[in-house]
Image (cartoon, rainbow, N blue to C red):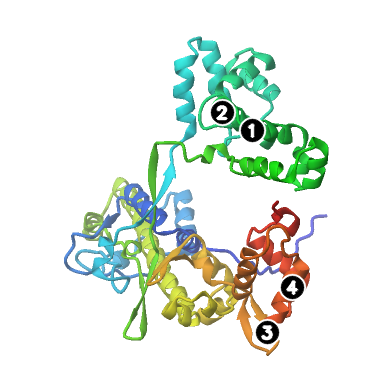
């Protein structure tokens, strides 16, 4: 027998407008501009209002999920929908501008900060290969290998797998030996070390290139170290290398100095001539003026968006019509959907602007000393929760704001995440940022004797002398965050 039960469930769901807001919030300025352009192209009811001189507003009543569900039910029953078009007929122009209070008029004149990045090495390799290989079959093999080389310049996919790739994707039959010959040709091109399958092979390729130009005996020793003592070299067991190769310490030091100057990531080589320019566009601007800090949102985050006037006129015409036919109702249904979408997008953009400003102002309030003097030691301990509690929002919201966004200050441009750090209590009971501790560690390691580098135990003692009681494992964690290897791997001859 079928039993029926009645139960209540409490579920938390995000509305489509909230989902749209969350997606917009995590975008930086450049990506946000692209997203606005996409929306303007996709939704004809949304317009760029830069050329509008008069500022107009619309009734920001949200149609809501209930209305959408009701509309879908009407469509299933093929019933005409009674539109409440008063929400679309607020003003003559039906537009809204969102560029107030979000940055000065001269923000658009600010030049972005250029960062030079290098062009694709694959294009150069293909050009070089095309001038050497005149057989179409061999060129296809070379193209497959070059396309498989990873961004750092290494070929990590086994040749046997590439043989199968060519067979299944292009119906090209080959062998590992044939691919090996093609790879040998590719490895002769610039940058040196390209196409290597391991760090050892990468360094040996570069040594070989140098040996072709010079007969320096140090090159021969460097090759022997890489071929016979790679593991000892990587672990800096220099005494074992001296004993195995029967060389003096000074002679070994010259060879090691030569090896460490080689490039372990050939695709990052600076020998590539063609470059392109990327840019960092600050999302916020913080200025000090007469002892006060002013926070501005880059005006590129505040587009002037408005509802299409022509769509509004169509809605007005429908309102005046006494007996609209089915075709007119369907057209107005489409228009209403586009208007809803445009209104939701404008609301999400404005909510994004307010959230960004609120979060940045709170960060500036907490880190006021740093923004006034630019001293890293002035940074206070601050985590996402601290900001979230002050602005009354969820931690995930603050996290999205801090992700991939930059702020321009009088002391340079900083990633927002730079201002977040955990706190440490000193011997005197004062709470300071762990960045101060990391700075002490970095300075101590920077002036250490490289023949006898400081161990984590010794670094812990140095911090203790300065009043920071920190466990050795915490010192190791901070050292790793600074990308500093252990003492044994920092040792030099």
- Discs 2, 3 touching: Cβ within 8 Å: no
Indicate the secondary structure of the residue bearing disc 4.
Answer: helix
Indicate the secondary structure of the residue bearing disc 3.
Answer: loop
Nearest to viewer (mark 2 / mark 4): 2
Residue at which label 1 appears: 219
Whole-number angstrom distance, CA of label 2 to CA of label 3: 57 Å
Q: Position of residue 127 (x, y in %)?
A: 44, 23
Q: Earlier in the sequence, mark 2 or mark 1?
A: 2
Q: Classify mark 4: residues with Cα within 10 Å, few (<14), some (14-19) or many (20+).
A: many
Q: Earlier in the sequence, mark 3 or mark 4?
A: 3
Residue 214: assigned label: 2
Indicate the secondary structure of the residue bearing disc 1.
Answer: helix
Q: Earlier in the sequence, mark 3 or mark 1?
A: 1
Q: Quadrant of residue 476?
A: bottom right
Depicted 178 relative to depicted 196: above or below:
above
- Discs 2, 1 touching: Cβ within 8 Å: yes
In-front residue for pair 54/442 = 442
Q: Position of residue 30 (x, y in %)?
A: 39, 55
Q: Earlier in the sequence, mark 2 or mark 4?
A: 2
The residue sitting at 68% across, 58% down in the picture is 450
User: Is residue 464 at all visible to an observer of this figure?
Assistant: yes
Depicted 176 relative to depicted 73: above or below:
above
Q: Quadrant of residue 147?
A: top right
């Amino acid at each position: 027998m079928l039993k029926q039960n009645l139960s209540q469930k409490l579920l938390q769901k995000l509305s489509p407008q909230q989902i749209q807001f969350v997606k917009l919030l995590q975008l930086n300025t450049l990506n946000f501009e692209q997203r606005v352009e996409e929306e303007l192209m996709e939704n004809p009811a949304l317009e760029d209002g830069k050329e509008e001189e008069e500022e107009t507003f619309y009734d920001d009543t949200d149609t809501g999920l209930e209305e959408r569900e009701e509309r879908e039910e009407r469509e299933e029953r093929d019933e005409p929908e009674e539109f409440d078009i008063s929400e679309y007929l607020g003003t003559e122009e039906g537009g809204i501008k969102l560029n107030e209070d979000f940055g000065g008029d001269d923000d658009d004149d600010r030049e972005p900060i250029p960062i030079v990045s290098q062009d694709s090495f694959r294009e150069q390799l293909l050009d070089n290969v095309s001038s050497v290989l005149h057989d179409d079959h061999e060129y296809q093999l070379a193209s497959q290998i070059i396309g498989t080389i990873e961004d750092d310049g290494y070929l990590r996919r086994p040749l046997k797998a590439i043989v199968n790739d060519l067979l299944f994707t292009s119906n090209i039959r080959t062998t590992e030996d044939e691919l090996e010959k093609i790879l040998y040709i590719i490895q002769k091109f610039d940058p040196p070390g390209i196409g290597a399958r391991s760090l050892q092979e990468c360094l040996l390729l570069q040594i070989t290139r140098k040996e072709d130009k010079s007969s320096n005996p140090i090159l021969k020793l460097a090759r022997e170290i890489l071929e016979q003592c790679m593991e000892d070299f990587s672990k800096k067991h220099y005494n074992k290398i001296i004993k195995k190769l029967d060389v003096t310490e000074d002679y070994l030091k010259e060879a090691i100095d030569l090896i460490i100057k080689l490039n372990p990531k050939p695709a990052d080589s600076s020998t590539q001539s063609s470059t392109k320019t990327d840019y960092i566009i600050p999302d916020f601007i913080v200025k000090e003026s007469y002892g006060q800090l002013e926070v501005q949102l880059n005006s590129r985050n505040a587009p002037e968006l408005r509802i299409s006037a022509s769509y509004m006129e169509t809605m007005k015409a429908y309102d005046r019509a006494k007996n609209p036919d089915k075709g007119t109702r369907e057209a107005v249904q489409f228009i209403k959907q586009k208007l809803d979408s445009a209104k939701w997008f404008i609301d999400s953009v404005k909510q994004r602007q307010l959230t960004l400003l609120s979060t940045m102002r709170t960060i500036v309030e907490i880190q006021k000393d740093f923004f006034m003097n630019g001293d890293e030691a002035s940074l206070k301990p601050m985590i996402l929760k601290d900001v979230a509690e002050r602005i009354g929002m969820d931690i995930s919201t603050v996290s999205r704001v801090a992700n991939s966004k930059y702020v321009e200050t009088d002391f340079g441009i900083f990633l927002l995440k730079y201002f977040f750090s955990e706190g440490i209590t000193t011997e005197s009971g004062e709470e300071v940022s762990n960045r101060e501790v990391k700075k002490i560690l970095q300075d101590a390691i920077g002036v250490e004797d490289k023949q006898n580098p400081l161990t984590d135990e010794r670094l812990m003692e140095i911090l203790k002398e300065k009043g920071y009681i920190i466990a050795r494992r915490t010192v190791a964690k901070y050292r790793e965050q600074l990308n500093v290897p252990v003492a044994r791997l920092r040792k030099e001859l």
